[in-house]
Image (tube, rainbow, N blue to C red):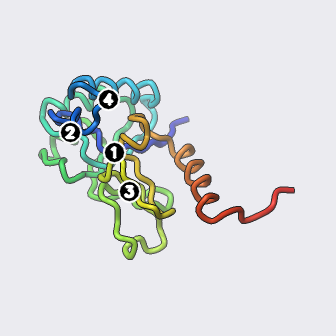
Protein backbone atom coordinates (compact mmCIF):
# COMPACT_ATOMS: atom_id res chain seq x y z
CA UNK A 1 0.00 0.00 0.00
CA UNK A 2 1.40 3.38 -0.95
CA UNK A 3 1.72 6.25 1.48
CA UNK A 4 1.66 10.04 1.05
CA UNK A 5 4.52 12.28 2.21
CA UNK A 6 5.30 16.00 2.27
CA UNK A 7 8.56 17.95 2.14
CA UNK A 8 9.67 21.45 1.20
CA UNK A 9 12.81 23.47 0.67
CA UNK A 10 15.25 20.78 -0.44
CA UNK A 11 17.48 23.53 -1.91
CA UNK A 12 19.51 21.12 -4.05
CA UNK A 13 22.19 23.04 -5.94
CA UNK A 14 22.12 26.01 -3.53
CA UNK A 15 25.86 26.54 -3.22
CA UNK A 16 25.59 28.42 0.10
CA UNK A 17 23.03 26.17 1.81
CA UNK A 18 25.59 25.18 4.44
CA UNK A 19 25.61 28.80 5.66
CA UNK A 20 21.90 28.50 6.47
CA UNK A 21 22.04 24.87 7.59
CA UNK A 22 25.34 24.91 9.51
CA UNK A 23 25.28 21.21 10.41
CA UNK A 24 26.44 20.65 6.81
CA UNK A 25 29.84 21.67 5.47
CA UNK A 26 28.86 21.81 1.78
CA UNK A 27 25.96 21.66 -0.64
CA UNK A 28 27.00 18.14 -1.65
CA UNK A 29 27.02 16.89 1.94
CA UNK A 30 23.58 18.46 2.42
CA UNK A 31 22.22 16.88 -0.76
CA UNK A 32 23.66 13.46 0.09
CA UNK A 33 22.12 13.56 3.56
CA UNK A 34 18.67 14.60 2.34
CA UNK A 35 18.80 11.95 -0.41
CA UNK A 36 19.76 9.28 2.13
CA UNK A 37 17.00 10.29 4.57
CA UNK A 38 14.44 10.43 1.75
CA UNK A 39 15.29 7.05 0.25
CA UNK A 40 15.37 5.21 3.57
CA UNK A 41 11.84 6.53 4.27
CA UNK A 42 10.02 6.72 0.92
CA UNK A 43 9.44 3.70 -1.35
CA UNK A 44 9.00 3.72 -5.11
CA UNK A 45 5.22 3.33 -4.70
CA UNK A 46 4.77 6.26 -2.29
CA UNK A 47 3.63 9.72 -3.34
CA UNK A 48 5.55 12.81 -2.21
CA UNK A 49 4.31 16.37 -2.50
CA UNK A 50 7.39 18.59 -2.70
CA UNK A 51 6.25 22.07 -1.71
CA UNK A 52 8.74 24.21 -3.52
CA UNK A 53 12.35 25.34 -3.64
CA UNK A 54 13.47 21.92 -4.80
CA UNK A 55 16.58 22.78 -6.82
CA UNK A 56 18.52 25.74 -8.11
CA UNK A 57 20.43 24.29 -11.07
CA UNK A 58 20.04 21.92 -14.01
CA UNK A 59 22.71 19.68 -12.51
CA UNK A 60 20.77 19.50 -9.23
CA UNK A 61 17.50 18.55 -10.90
CA UNK A 62 19.16 15.34 -12.08
CA UNK A 63 19.62 14.42 -8.39
CA UNK A 64 15.86 14.61 -7.91
CA UNK A 65 15.54 11.56 -10.19
CA UNK A 66 17.44 9.58 -7.51
CA UNK A 67 14.68 10.21 -4.95
CA UNK A 68 12.15 7.41 -4.46
CA UNK A 69 8.45 7.87 -5.03
CA UNK A 70 5.93 9.47 -7.34
CA UNK A 71 6.89 13.10 -6.86
CA UNK A 72 4.56 16.08 -7.34
CA UNK A 73 6.09 19.55 -7.35
CA UNK A 74 4.23 22.59 -6.06
CA UNK A 75 6.54 25.30 -7.33
CA UNK A 76 8.32 27.68 -5.00
CA UNK A 77 9.96 31.06 -5.46
CA UNK A 78 13.32 29.45 -6.33
CA UNK A 79 11.94 26.93 -8.83
CA UNK A 80 12.89 28.92 -11.91
CA UNK A 81 13.73 26.20 -14.42
CA UNK A 82 11.45 25.51 -17.36
CA UNK A 83 8.46 23.34 -16.45
CA UNK A 84 9.51 20.76 -19.04
CA UNK A 85 12.73 20.20 -17.04
CA UNK A 86 10.79 19.54 -13.83
CA UNK A 87 8.47 17.13 -15.66
CA UNK A 88 11.47 14.90 -16.35
CA UNK A 89 11.60 14.03 -12.63
CA UNK A 90 8.13 14.96 -11.31
CA UNK A 91 4.83 13.40 -12.39
CA UNK A 92 3.07 16.76 -11.98
CA UNK A 93 4.04 20.41 -11.55
CA UNK A 94 1.50 22.69 -9.88
CA UNK A 95 1.26 26.20 -8.47
CA UNK A 96 -1.04 25.04 -5.69
CA UNK A 97 -2.66 21.69 -4.90
CA UNK A 98 -5.22 20.22 -2.49
CA UNK A 99 -5.04 17.12 -0.35
CA UNK A 100 -7.77 16.00 2.08
CA UNK A 101 -8.95 19.51 2.95
CA UNK A 102 -5.48 21.08 2.98
CA UNK A 103 -4.06 23.64 0.60
CA UNK A 104 -0.59 22.57 -0.48
CA UNK A 105 1.57 25.60 -1.25
CA UNK A 106 5.14 26.76 -1.00
CA UNK A 107 4.42 30.08 0.71
CA UNK A 108 1.88 30.07 3.58
CA UNK A 109 -1.56 31.22 2.47
CA UNK A 110 -2.96 34.37 4.07
CA UNK A 111 -5.47 33.40 6.81
CA UNK A 112 -8.36 35.13 5.00
CA UNK A 113 -7.74 32.95 1.94
CA UNK A 114 -7.85 29.61 3.76
CA UNK A 115 -11.66 29.52 3.44
CA UNK A 116 -12.15 26.86 6.08
CA UNK A 117 -9.24 24.73 4.94
CA UNK A 118 -5.77 24.27 6.41
CA UNK A 119 -2.37 24.82 4.82
CA UNK A 120 0.67 22.57 4.45
CA UNK A 121 3.55 24.75 3.27
CA UNK A 122 7.27 25.46 3.32
CA UNK A 123 9.19 28.67 2.57
CA UNK A 124 9.63 29.93 6.14
CA UNK A 125 12.20 27.25 6.99
CA UNK A 126 12.70 26.98 10.76
CA UNK A 127 10.05 29.57 11.55
CA UNK A 128 6.53 28.37 12.23
CA UNK A 129 3.25 30.20 12.21
CA UNK A 130 1.63 29.97 15.66
CA UNK A 131 -1.72 28.97 14.23
CA UNK A 132 -3.24 25.49 14.27
CA UNK A 133 -4.28 25.81 10.61
CA UNK A 134 -0.68 25.77 9.33
CA UNK A 135 1.81 22.91 9.00
CA UNK A 136 5.36 23.82 7.97
CA UNK A 137 7.18 20.96 6.20
CA UNK A 138 10.42 22.79 5.41
CA UNK A 139 13.38 20.42 5.72
CA UNK A 140 14.47 22.04 9.01
CA UNK A 141 11.12 21.20 10.61
CA UNK A 142 10.95 17.56 9.52
CA UNK A 143 14.50 16.46 10.34
CA UNK A 144 15.43 16.54 6.64
CA UNK A 145 13.12 13.55 6.04
CA UNK A 146 9.78 13.62 4.20
CA UNK A 147 6.92 13.42 6.68
CA UNK A 148 4.13 10.91 6.15
CA UNK A 149 0.51 12.06 6.17
CA UNK A 150 -0.41 9.94 9.24
CA UNK A 151 2.56 11.31 11.22
CA UNK A 152 1.68 14.87 10.22
CA UNK A 153 -1.88 14.30 11.47
CA UNK A 154 -0.61 12.83 14.76
CA UNK A 155 1.60 15.88 15.31
CA UNK A 156 -1.31 18.10 14.40
CA UNK A 157 -3.58 16.36 16.92
CA UNK A 158 -0.99 16.81 19.66
CA UNK A 159 -0.61 20.47 18.71
CA UNK A 160 -4.40 20.92 18.81
CA UNK A 161 -4.57 19.45 22.31
CA UNK A 162 -1.93 21.93 23.47
CA UNK A 163 -3.64 24.79 21.67
CA UNK A 164 -7.25 24.03 22.60
CA UNK A 165 -6.87 21.77 25.63
CA UNK A 166 -8.68 18.48 26.08
CA UNK A 167 -12.10 18.45 24.52
CA UNK A 168 -13.38 15.25 26.06
CA UNK A 169 -12.70 13.05 29.06
CA UNK A 170 -11.36 9.54 28.66
CA UNK A 171 -13.51 6.86 30.24
Q: Which SS class for mark 4?
A: loop
N-terminal of the pair, mark 4 or mark 3, is 4
N-terminal of the pair, mark 2 or mark 4, is 4
N-terminal of the pair, mark 1 or mark 2, is 1
Please say if the residues under marks 4 and 1 sit with CB atoms less than 8 Å apart: no
Which image quadrant for residue 7?
A: top left
Please say if the residues under marks 2 and 4 sit with CB atoms less than 8 Å apart: no
Mark 4 → mark 3, Cα distance in angstroms: 28 Å
Disc 2 residue crowd, few under 14, some 14–19, many 20+, Cα 10 Å: many
Q: Position of residue 142 (x, y in %)?
A: 43, 40
Disc 1 residue crowd, few under 14, some 14–19, many 20+, Cα 10 Å: many
Q: Which residue is mark 4?
A: 23
Which image quadrant for residue 50?
A: top left
Q: Residue at x 56, y 53 (%)?
A: 156
N-terminal of the pair, mark 3 or mark 1, is 1
Q: Which residue is mark 2?
A: 55
Q: Position of residue 74 (x, y in %)?
A: 29, 51
Mark 3 → mark 1, Cα distance in angstroms: 10 Å
Q: Which residue is mark 1?
A: 8
Q: Which residue is mark 3?
A: 104
- State whether residue 61 is above or below residue 132: above
N-terminal of the pair, mark 2 or mark 3, is 2
Amino acid sequence: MSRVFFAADLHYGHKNIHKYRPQFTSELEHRDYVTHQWNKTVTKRDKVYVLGDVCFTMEAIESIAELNGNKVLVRGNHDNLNTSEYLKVFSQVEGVARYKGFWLTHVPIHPLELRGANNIHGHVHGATIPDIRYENVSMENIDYTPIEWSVLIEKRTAKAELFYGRTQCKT
